[in-house]
Image (tube, coloured by chain):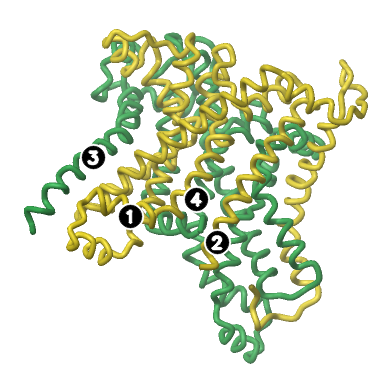
Chain colours: A green, B yellow
Amino acid sequence: MQALTDRPNRLALAIVWIGIAIVAFPLWITFTASTLTPQEIARGELLLPGGQGFETYSTILLEGARTSRMASPPVAGMMWNSLVMALVIALGKIAISILSAYAVVFFSFPGRMIFFWTIFITLMLPVEVRIVPTYQVVADLGMINSFAGLTIPLIASATATLLFRQFFLTIPDELVEAAKVDGAGPMRFFWDMVLPLSRTNIAALFVIMFIYGWNQYLWPLLITTSASMDTIVIGITKMIGGGDALTDWNAVMATTFLAILPPALVVLIMQRQFVKGLVDIEK
Amino acid sequence: MRRKVIFEHKLLPYLLLAPQLAITLVFFIWPSVQAMWMSLLREDMFGLSSTFVGLENYVRVLSDPGYVAAVRRTVVFSVAVALLALLPALLLAVMVDKLTRRVATYRVILVLPYAIAPAIAGVLWLFMFNPSVGIVAAGIRGLGFAWNPKLDGQDAMILVILASAWKQISYNFLFFLAGLQAIPKSLLEAAAIDGAGEWRRFRTIVLPLLSPVTFFLVTVNVVYAFFDTFGVIHAVTQGGPAKATEVLVYKAWYDGIIATDFGISSAQSVILMAVVIALTAIQFRFIDRKVTY
């Protein structure tokens, strides 16, 4: 029996390692290129890291990339913009979604279903299908080039509301009954029971929404025009320019590595919550 | 479905809903209604006044050969991205499911691209396939093939498809693996005892049981390819060369924001809205069915 299962396992292992190579190779090349000089990159000596790393990283972080075409702002500032954006979006989505799900599940009031469907409908209206008018609304509210404009319009979340609603429906009636008998009001029950019980869901949503916020592209492209508001993802594409021989690939790849690091760390550190949460949320 | 035991309060539920509803109305519903309205207007040359033109913008969009070409391109792009993101993910999930050791380690490495922005995935692949310094581009040329995504539209299309699919494999892999792990092992063992070979077990047991997950992933991947790949295309090719990678979302953005033709861009937005609504409806119909059996 052992011999029977060993052979297919070796094939499976080989295929898995090919998959890992396809995932890891671009990331490894990104890292090595960020530690090499432009000359070394041009010669194609990419497989091993070089000695230029410290200098490249400290220059781009504190002074910005000086490419032949343009000077980018310091990458530390871009990372700060991305971090604020990702955190405000993740925490904001969780906060307003848990409150609205609580209202929809634990109360009965006129218009309940209309409100629920209004939130639900946002699933079908991504930014991509309403580009110009959304830009105009943000411009009319004076929120262009501001953190408010970058974050608040993205904080509504049907997915998070649906997930919390699903979970709240499983909280046993006896628990609510007991709380009412003890004289706890709705907000007391929310703070003392619902919020602690939702910990796992909140953690999973945080990972997914942090990545969502950090990786935004079309939205910051529309809402920010000043280089000081660039997120790191937008900043990189500005650095590439034509993507030809004149691009300072070592600076671009160092910035790319820094853009990947925070969301990748969040996934690595919170992998258990993330994997379970992602599959649950989409169900 | 609703709870039996609830709280009584007149004002509180509205207060709890207020932030979410305010954002939804101001930044989602209102702009969408505006998009529909603007798609019926035509602005004059200077953007000073606009006149109601009925469905004329739609007629102009749909009869524009450039738009029809973009539709065709988007279909090719989306089918290619979905297939290249789904098939390798299924293969990897089946193989990881067979392994007994270090599964968590393999899984977390294979999941990493999920954390990477589409635009960044584009940059990674641009770097490898760049004609002047790209390590893979050098290999392709070494094999005697011409390769230049800067000049050749087909090369550019291949590049954005590969980058977009690479990023999405992680997501599909996670769902396929979860689906495989939910299949009772006793079922497969029984089939094995009855003499069903590995391929036969996969075809007659595993694949049918995975069909709900597969169907869900197909719609998710089509939505991804349609909408979320804007970053890949904007970062890598800017829709070029000569519009060879201009898909529908890119065109709607370009015509609205760069060419500032609001009526035309809004008509394109409304058409895209219909696409998302159709895809979401398909997806939820399927979920309903899953709930009832």
Image quarter of residue A134: top right
Is residue A55 left or right of B261 when viewed as pictured?
Answer: left
Mark 1–mark 4 Cα distance, whole angstroms, equals 16 Å
Q: Chain of mark 3?
A: A
Residue A142 placement, left or right of A173 = right
Q: Which residue is mark 4?
A: B216
Q: Which residue is mark 1?
A: B206
Tell me the distance, in whole angstroms, between the alpha carbons under discs 1 and 3. Answer: 19 Å
The label number, if any, that marks residue B289 in the structure image: 2
Is residue B262 shown to the viewer in this render? no
Kindly state the secondary structure of the residue where label 2 is placed.
helix
Q: Which residue is mark 3?
A: A15
Q: Chain of mark 2?
A: B
Q: Are marks 1 and 4 in contact (CB under 8 Å)?
A: no
Cα distance between the residues tagged 4 and 3: 25 Å
Gap in Å between the C-alphas at discs 1 and 2? 20 Å
Q: Identify which residue is drawn at 59% across, 50% down.
A: B282
Residue A138: x, y in percent? Answer: 76, 38
Question: In the rendered structure, which amino acid carries the disc numbered 4?
Answer: Phe
Residue lying at 47% horizontally and 65% vertically, measured from the top left: A200
